[in-house]
Image (cartoon, rainbow, N blue to C red):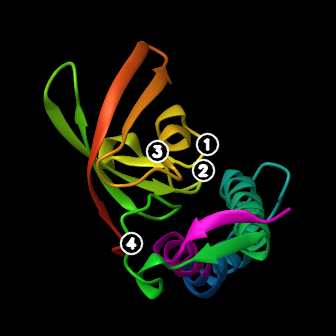
Amino acid sequence: MQTPMTAAGAAKLEAELKQLRSVERPRIIQAIAEARELGDLKENAEYHAAREEQGFIEGRIKEIEAKLSHANIIDVTRLPPSDKVIFGATVSVLDVDSDEEITYKIVGDDEADIKSNMISIHSPIARALVGKSLGDEVTVDAPGGKRIFEITEVQYIA
């Protein structure tokens, strides 16, 4: 199953994968070799800690490889500009009730970070916004109740 991912999200995962393969993996292999030289492996805490870390690193490498292999990478900067909200768009909305303006970037599940206003394509707000256009009002069934937003800006930026 293909999962949507922004080009920036894919680049971040690829950078982490490169770091794990070229820096962390060789470092932990060296740590295991050094711990083996200390003798009895049954009571060697350094060896067991290094093996545990190796398991974590190898698991993370497999996880990233799987995510990237199933990713449908979408680069909105290569699409013609439009006022329509799509995956990867940066959308500014006005909360009609509070008169507060908020900007969200609609991203994949693994990239979502509400502190950075990056919301998952599967979140209630993103689901309500996708397919709408500049000037539209949308009603969002948020966990805190219904909220009404007016779309004030749609950008296709990285």
Mark with earlier residue (3, 4): 4
Residue 157 place in picture, x, y as percent:
33, 74
Is residue 84 or residue 13 the one in the foreground?
84
Q: Nearer the viewer, mark 1 or mark 3?
A: 3
Amino acid at dot 4: Ser
Question: Which span of residues is magenta-colored?
Answer: 1-17
Mark 2 or mark 1, which has the lower sequence index? 2
Give SS at disc 2. loop
Q: Residue furthest top?
A: 145
Q: Is residue 123 left or right of residue 39?
A: left
Q: Is residue 43 magenta?
A: no
The residue tagged 3 is 129
**Residue for badge 1:** 122
- Say whether marks 2 and 1 touch (CB < 8 Å): yes
| Residue under numbered circle 4 | 82
Residue 109's tag is 2
Whichever of callouts 2 and 4 sits on the residue coming sooner in the sequence is: 4
Of residues 100 and 1, the one drawn nearer to the viewer in this rendering:
100
